[in-house]
Image (tube, rainbow, N blue to C red):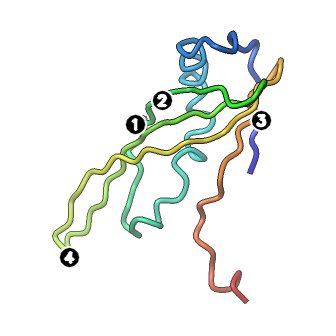
């Protein structure tokens, strides 16, 4: 799934700190896609809001980049005596255009039984 985020201008290709600063400002617009569905971990897993941290931004092609990031999530189940905080590290590819960043997110929604038929 691709998502286009308008930006006024993109940083120099090799300036990682400027890329991180720019993307950190637009995290609220892509936070849901970055964290995806935590159902793969547990039905009780919940994202910890505001915990997305950018680890690195690497250039992979003339206008292509890979962002590595981490976020925290919590799983609580009183019946099973589980209360745990976890940190997950993932990456997403994106493309830089003069007026936008286009992120290429992987769909992490669990398929429903009806989808399997």
Counting from the top left corner in percent of width and height, residue 23 is at: 59, 24
Determine which residue is flagged by label 4: 79
**Mark found first going from the N terminus, 3 or 4:** 3
Determine which residue is flagged by label 3: 4
- The residue positioned 61% from the left and 41% from the top of the image is 92
The residues tagged by marks 4 and 2 sit, at their Cα atoms, a distance apart of 35 Å
Q: Residues within 10 Å of mark 4 (few under 14, many from 20)?
A: few
Give the residue furthest to the left. 81
Kindly indicate the quadrant of the structure image that contains residue 64.
top right
**Mark found first going from the N terminus, 3 or 1:** 3
- The residue positioned 36% from the left and 66% from the top of the image is 44
Counting from the top left corner in percent of width and height, residue 80 is at: 20, 75
Q: In the image, which is nearer the foreground, mark 2 or mark 3?
A: 2
The disc at residue 51 is: 1
- The residue positioned 43% from the left and 39% from the top of the image is 70
Q: In the image, which is nearer the foreground, mark 4 or mark 2?
A: 2
Determine which residue is flagged by label 2: 54
Element type where label 2 sits in the image = strand
* Whether residue 93 is situated above or below residue 57 in the rendered picture: below
The residues tagged by marks 4 and 1 sit, at their Cα atoms, a distance apart of 27 Å
Q: In the image, which is nearer the foreground, mark 4 or mark 1?
A: 1
Counting from the top left corner in percent of width and height, residue 14 is at: 64, 13
**Mark found first going from the N terminus, 4 or 2:** 2
Q: Residues within 10 Å of mark 1 (few under 14, many from 20)?
A: some
């Amino acid at each position: 799934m691709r998502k286009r985020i308008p930006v006024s201008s993109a940083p120099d290709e090799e300036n990682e700190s400027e890329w991180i600063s720019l993307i950190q400002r637009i995290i609220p617009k892509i936070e849901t896609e970055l964290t995806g569905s935590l159902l793969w971990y547990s039905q009780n897993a919940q994202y910890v809001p505001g915990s997305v941290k950018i680890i690195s931004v690497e250039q992979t092609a003339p206008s292509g980049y890979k962002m590595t990031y981490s976020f925290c999530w919590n799983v609580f189940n009183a019946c099973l005596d589980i209360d745990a905080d976890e940190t997950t590290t993932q990456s997403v590819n994106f493309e830089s255009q003069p007026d936008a960043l286009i992120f290429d997110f992987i769909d992490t929604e669990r398929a429903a039984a009806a989808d399997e038929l």
